[in-house]
Image: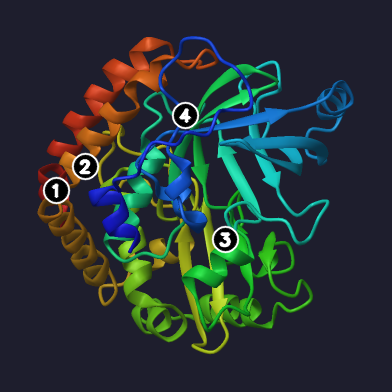
Amino acid sequence: MLLLMFACGRDLPESDSASPVETGDTADTAGRPDDLEGSDFLYADDILRFDITLDAQAMDALGTEPSDDVVATFAYAGEAYEVGLHLKGSSAGSFRTLDEKAAFKIDFHQWDETQTFRGVRRLTLNNMIQDSTMSHEHAAYWLFDLVGVPSPRHGYANVWVNGELYGLYGIVETADEQLVNRLFEGDDDGQMYEGGYGFDLYDWAVDEFPQKEGDETERVALQSLVTAVEACPADGVLELIEAYFDADALFAMWAVELAIADPDGYSTQANNYLLYHAPVAGRWTMLPWGPDQGFDDAEPLLDKINGRLTQMCLADAGCAPSLYAAIERALDTWESSGFADYVDAETVRIEADCRADPRSEWGDYGCRDEQALMREWVRARPAVVLGELP
């Protein structure tokens, strides 16, 4: 299980495979790929090494149209793949050019529909440029999974481009049909939408919600959900949530967002979330997406609530206790699972590679001092949250 992989790690033998690009003296980034079966690399204990090769034409094209795929070579442990590659991120946030620490979307079947990498069709490589510790997203996804929230997997790799170290990256499971297949096996033929940038459960947003998976012309279920939200009486929010959502997972997701003080999630900002409709179950599931801003906010627990459904719940005396109870359960899991010990170990594990990152915008203090502050914050947070619960 994913949880056991994260918590206990794997004893993987060292690989004899040579990297396709010779390197100088840096942190040990070769990884141990030979025993990584299927998509296990997404939660391996090792910091892996990926090599990307771009020719001059591809480099020029990415400089002009960074969101358009170019032909690139992706190499790992002596294996090479011709892939589609484009740059990732929004201009207002994490987007960086190739002259900086660019983030990447890699498509293994862009040019060959039969090609995958360890069974994976696409890779997302986050530059973690907005997180000085390079630890927030990794820790958040682990905690989401721990409390039972369907969520993407996360790992680490050092990325080299044309023989030059670009630095430490987060490997994030791409929000596509494979994520849906894994999380909703047997009920994976529905629609998935990406919420954010102002898109929330309002009638005006139904036709505009960015769609990740499913028939783009089929928005009947989304319209039904939004219509129910629009018509919901002030004292009927819990009944609405139980009728339309996997209620336990929804409350657990909001609980973790609030517990880790994520200022940019659904509950706090109506941002960075996925919505999936499982047609057989007839239920919606809300999934976290990009929780890299948490773990360092001292704002009061319920001070900034901007997600429409969370606002409605907290204003309903029949719904709010369900969220408070979910927060208490999340904190119980936080304490009983040894989450603080996990964060200690993971930040120490990546510190050398984080500090060796030549394109980091945070300098050495982020990987050392800010990580130390994060460890202290994680240990202190449960008591703080319990003290603020109504």
Q: Amino acid at mark 3?
A: Asp
- Which of the pair 308/157 is nearer the observer? 157
Name the colour scheme: rainbow
Identify the mark nearer the N-term, 4 or 2: 4
Residue 338 has which mark? 1
Q: Which residue is mark 4?
A: 30
Q: Position of residue 71 (x, y in %)?
A: 83, 38
Closer to the camera, 246 or 197? 246
Indicate left or right for 28 with 369 as reference: right
Q: Secondary structure at mark 2?
A: helix
Mark 3 vs mark 2, foreground winner is 2
On the image, which quarter does residue 76 sit in?
top right
Residue 384 pos. (x, y %): 14, 42
Mark closest to the chain's N terminus, 3 or 2: 3
Q: Which residue is mark 2?
A: 342
Q: Is residue 39 left or right of residue 134?
A: right
Q: Quadrant of residue 148?
A: bottom left
Q: Which residue is mark 3?
A: 200
The amino acid on which the numbered mark 2 sits, given as a three-letter code, is Tyr
Instruction: Say if 332 sits above or below 59 in the image.
Output: below
